[in-house]
């Protein structure tokens, strides 16, 4: 059965290391018949949550008029969500964290989803990515029926494109095929 796969790429560099792994995941998922869409967060205007509670008073409609409403609707409609980020100071980048915070308007509607996570870092140790993955699982623990299905550790990649040839390339492709 074909699934709707939404890939959220938070790399601030188009074709950056985490973005490249997103494409590998999509390649695998598409080859087995899934419908995959990538949203490059760098192209989107997503304002910060200002904790005004406007969304609570407005049936989930945020006071900000930006791209987040469309992204959030796609997250709600997806069967599978892939979240990818470079690691900055042992955590996800600001683009991804801002997106997560803005789901507050309708986060309880992001239910029964399978989640996959991709993180890339210059560090050679998988342990250096654990706090990033902890941040992702902190998010999914708040979502009804969310299942964390897989993690891609893109270690040892600092400069743009260094992930090519890394074993994470094959892992992302295989993980995409396995959903």
Image: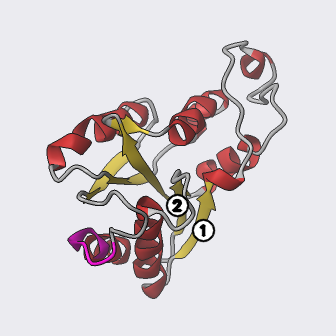
Name, please, the residue furthest toward the bottom.
31
- The part of the chain drawn in magenta is 164-169
State the residue position of label 1: 37
Image x and y of residue 87, in percent: 36, 44
Q: Nearer the viewer, residue 175 or 146?
A: 175
Q: Residue 72 appears in which quarter of the rendering?
A: top right
Q: Crowding at label 1, few (<14), some or many (≥20) Cα neighbours within 10 Å?
A: some
State the residue position of label 2: 7
Residue 63, placed above or below residue 136: above
Q: Residue 38 appears in which quarter of the rendering?
A: bottom right
Contact? badges 2 and 1 (CB < 8 Å): yes
Image x and y of residue 147, in percent: 35, 47
Q: Nearer the viewer, residue 32 or 1?
A: 32
Residue at x 46%, y 35% (from the top left corner):
143
Numbered marks: total: 2
Residue at x 40%, y 43% (from the top left corner):
146
Residue 4, placed above or below residue 144: below
Q: Nearer the viewer, residue 59 or 85?
A: 85
Assign a secondary structure to mark 2.
strand
Compute the Cα span from label 2 to label 1. Answer: 6 Å
Q: Is residue 70 left or right of residue 112?
A: right
């Amino acid at each position: 059965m074909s699934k709707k796969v939404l890939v959220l790429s938070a790399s601030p560099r188009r074709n950056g290391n985490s973005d490249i792994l997103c494409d590998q995941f999509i390649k695998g998922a598409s080859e087995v018949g899934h419908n995959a869409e990538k949203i490059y967060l760098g192209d989107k205007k997503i304002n910060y949550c200002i904790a005004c509670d406007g969304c609570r008073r407005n049936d989930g409609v945020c006071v900000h008029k930006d791209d987040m409403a469309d992204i959030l609707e796609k997250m709600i409609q997806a069967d599978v969500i892939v979240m990818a980020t470079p690691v900055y100071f042992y955590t996800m980048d600001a683009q991804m964290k801002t997106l997560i915070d803005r789901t507050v308007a309708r986060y309880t509607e992001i239910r029964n989803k399978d989640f996959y996570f991709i993180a890339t870092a210059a560090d050679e140790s998988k342990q250096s990515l654990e706090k990033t993955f902890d941040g992702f699982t902190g998010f999914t623990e708040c979502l009804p029926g969310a299942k964390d299905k897989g993690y891609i550790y893109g270690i040892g990649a600092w400069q743009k494109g260094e992930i090519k040839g890394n074993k994470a390339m094959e892992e992302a492709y295989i993980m995409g095929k396995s959903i």
